[in-house]
Amino acid sequence: MPEASAGRGRPRDRALDDRILEQVLALLGSHGYAGLTLDELAARSGVAKTTILRRWPSKAAVAAAGVERLALQTVDVPDSGTLRGDLRSLLHGAVESFVRGRGQFVPRLLRETGHHPEIADLLYTVIHTRRQAYRRVLALAVARGELAPTVDQELMIDLLIGPFWTRLLITRDPITEQYVDCNVEAVLTAFSVNPAVTG
Amino acid sequence: MPEASAGRGRPRDRALDDRILEQVLALLGSHGYAGLTLDELAARSGVAKTTILRRWPSKAAVAAAGVERLALQTVDVPDSGTLRGDLRSLLHGAVESFVRGRGQFVPRLLRETGHHPEIADLLYTVIHTRRQAYRRVLALAVARGELAPTVDQELMIDLLIGPFWTRLLITRDPITEQYVDCNVEAVLTAFSVNPAVTG
DNA sequence: ATATTTACGCTACCGCTCGTTGCGTAGGAG
DNA sequence: CTCCTACGCAACGAGCGGTAGCGTAAATAT
């Protein structure tokens, strides 16, 4: 968390922050956290290793700063008019981001959080942010009368995203569009949402 | 994978294998993989570090041998007579094993598999073994006419265990008995199993 | 212009851990 | 009794995270 001291001396070069954090994300994606070395990060950033460790206290802090930069992006809540459409949009968006997009390093890092709780916390906030979007969508459905207000929404969210993360982190089976859609249908059926609007 | 060469020299002390692997599992459970050091393992096993590295080529191989020893235990397929009872039994067994029992190190190791694919593969077999039990139980339900033969059983299993692993690996929310039962009910409803046998 | 203060690069270094090497010794097989 | 292997011990090398010191660049203060 480097803070501009606005003092008298030579000011910090902000462009170096950008170069370093950009390379951190690239290296996290290609080598993971354990495979990330400060020497390589310094070399690829065109920066001395000591410069990195003057701005952040540790390797974990640099990685956290990189992740935090991406974590700040908000998840746009879809509003397709139906719960089915909203859930499909959210889940397909998750696949797009975490399997193919810039969030690819998230499942990778989730498999390395065992001895790095700071990064685990950051990843938790990334996922928590997404979960909030599900809560919003479910609240909208309740307001429309599409979903009974008595259902356990946390369980419902777990049922929606649980299979996704299980395949991503454990079995590593492919996640197809059809799989996601079937998952949504099963959960909608479980909570008695009208089965086929087919607008 | 040390093999008795049956040669002429001093035979290997098999008891050392047991002591080492026993301590490996203890240390994996308490410190995780990264926190496991060969020096400490040697000290607690009452063995020289070189002895360990003569039997297995690396730290990862020792850890894998320890996990493999536990992975060989089979999962007993329950047979309560109803699908509901079988699934409850399997899921409560999973909670008992992975949250409170000897399998505690499994979720811990799953968070450290990023740079250790050998261990990831072993953990995969552990979970795969459990998944086979679910397949057996679902097949029994189909044979009893309790479950339609057309349902996507893989999706159904993902819906059953996905929330469990999501809470265990990501959100770390507690997993209560009530939560597990509600999960089972939701999945049974989703796949049109008769809602209340209440035998 | 000069002094001061901070940032940066560079080199060297410490500490920890995995893994190797060499040696002295213990202990079965022939 | 003589090999051959296992074991313990001590030392070492390599890789990486993190620190310290020095020379220099770039800004502000006087």
Image (cartoon, coloured by chain):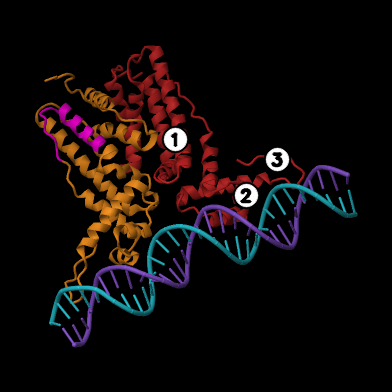
Chain colours: A red, B orange, C cyan, D purple
Query: Please, is residue D28 above or below residue A136 in the view?
Result: below
Residue that badge 1 annotates: A124
- Image quadrant occupied by the C terminus of chain B: top left
Residue that badge 3 annotates: A5
Q: Amino acid at mark 2?
A: Arg
Question: Dominant secondary structure of the magenta stretch?
Answer: helix
Residue that badge 2 annotates: A54
Callout 3: few (<14), some (14-19), or many (20+) C-alpha neighbours within 10 Å? Answer: few
- Describe the element under mark 2 as helix, strand or loop: helix
Q: CA distance from mark 3 to mark 1?
A: 31 Å
Q: Amino acid at mark 1?
A: Tyr
Q: CA distance from mark 2 to mark 3?
A: 14 Å
- Is residue A178 shown to the viewer in this render? no
Is residue A198 found inside the magenta-colored segment of the image? Answer: no
In the image, which disc is placed on residue A37? none
- Is residue B50 shown to the viewer in this render? yes
- Describe the element under mark 3 as helix, strand or loop: loop
Q: Chain of mark 2?
A: A
- Image quadrant occupied by the N terminus of chain B: bottom left
Q: Please identify, in this view, whether the residue under mark 3 or under mark 1 is nearer the observer.
A: 3
Residue placed most toward the observer, B123 or B186: B123
Callout 1: few (<14), some (14-19), or many (20+) C-alpha neighbours within 10 Å? Answer: some
Residue placed most toward the observer, C18 or A19: C18
Q: Chain of mark 1?
A: A
Q: Chain of mark 3?
A: A
Tell me the magenta residue range.
Answer: B76-96
Residue B153 picture quarter: top left
